[in-house]
Image (cartoon, helix red, strand yellow):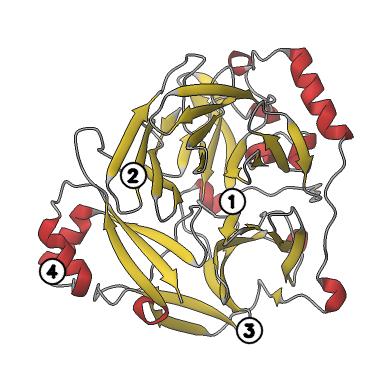
Amino acid sequence: MVQFDNFDTIMGDHFKNGARSKSLKSSVNKNLMVLVILSFLLMGSLSLNSQSKTGALPAIDVLKNYPRKEFILQDIAKVEYIPFETNDKALMGRTLKIFYISDDYIIAANINEGDVFVYNGNGKWKYSFNHKGQGPREYVRANSIAFDEKAKEVFICEWYSSNPKILVYAENGTYKRTLPIPPKFHPNLYNFDDETLLVYDEYGVFSMEDFSRRPYLFMSKKDGRFTDSLNIHLPVRISNASVWKGEHNGEQATFSRMIGISYNRSYGKNFLIADWSADTIYRLTPRKELQPMIVRKQPMQSTNPKILISNFLATDKFILLGVHSMDYEAIRNGQSIDQKQLMYDFKTGEVNEYRLKNKDISSSTNTMIRDAITPGNTGITLYDASLLHDLNKKGELRGDLKELLKTLDEEDNPVLVKIKFQ
């Protein structure tokens, strides 16, 4: 794999014609995989607990230009700056993704290098490990990570080896067990309860297997069996990637350039299910009840170009959504696409195109909420240490952020911005 930037990847033959290349075929026992898939096809799906029976669901018009509203973060949220401790065992690098935060833990990883970092809730380093490799207890790339704080287990899913799998480690990186996954299955992982992972087949859009049309499954943490599914059926799926064929090192290959677009998130004790290909955003409760929350006015299949709705964050008061016009030719050429940020107020029903400004940065025009599993009403973003020093030299920092720079070196790890909305 060749990485162009955070979202651009040469996929080789990995998704060629919707199938893996011969060199990437899974070596998992075929009989086992048949049993796994058969058990999924035969099992019952969870029923919907529809809220539409008691009234019309709120609707988002993806073609409408809503009025813009600007918010100062500190007026609507408690903003906390958490610098990640920097030491010889915790050098985070630039391709950093935060997967999980709570009052007591922060789990992050350098996706390209394979480093996994375990911090406490105050940004103090606890553990780092890296098991990147081709071995049975190693991962080629940490595609998705879930953390079970109660069991102190880290689940890492990787798709790109000849034996795609989910590896389970203790928080210090000690190997514990392996969960098999079917070929052509590319799950993102979410810690659902003590026994179960919620797994979501994002990239099944390229293969369209049965589990791609029903992409939300529950998996046993113990042995990897599918135990249930959500009753979300997607006969047609839409992608955040522009895909084309070409030549790489003298061989035919399939290329993909992607736009980072968020989807499923935590929502307090609930999950928000926001599939790009669905016309409804759902709340998933701890009892596995699937409750419709918001619908789009124009069905996804009715617009040209296709328009995706993403979910940045849901709080008790509002939900932050993205509207993305998928011009695949523009994506392929590295050009920008039309995107909006919308806030829907649960109480008033008001919809606005929003901007979130940080008053501690005078030049701040907007704060993007990053993907991560977070506590209720909480979003996050990251500030690069060197960027903060550059802003300070320009006189653009103030308040708590300027005070923080007194103890922050330009080469230090980034600063986590924890935003708890009131």
Q: Earlier in the sequence, mark 4 or mark 2?
A: 2
Q: Is residue 63 visible?
A: yes
**Residue 105, position in %: x, y?**
40, 48
Of circles 4 and 2, the one toward us is: 2
> Which element is circle 4 on?
loop
Badge 1 density bin: few <14, some 14–19, many ≥20, Cα 10 Å: many
Question: Could you classify mark 2 by the number of other residues whose Cα lies within 10 Å: few (under 14), some (14-19), or many (20 or more)?
Answer: many
Mark 1 sits on what residue? 328
Q: Residue at x 27, y 49 (%)?
A: 84
> Label 2, label 3: how many angstroms apart (C-alpha)?
37 Å
> Which residue, given by chain and number where applicable, does mark 4 sit on?
394
- Please name the residue that numbered disc 2 is placed on: 119
Q: CA gap, disc 1 to disc 3?
A: 36 Å
2 vs 1, front mark: 2
Relative height, residue 417 to residue 75 (above, below)? above
Q: How packed is label 3: few (under 14 Cα within 10 Å), some, or many (20 or more)? A: few
Q: Disc 3 residue type?
A: Lys
Local secondary structure at mark 2: strand
Residue at horizontal 67 percent and vertical 15 percent from the top: 28
Question: Mark 3 sits on what residue?
Answer: 347
Mark 4 or mark 1, which is nearer to you? Answer: 4
- Which numbered disc flags the more N-terminal residue, 2 or 1? 2
Query: Which residue is pictured at 63% across the width and 84% down the height?
Result: 347
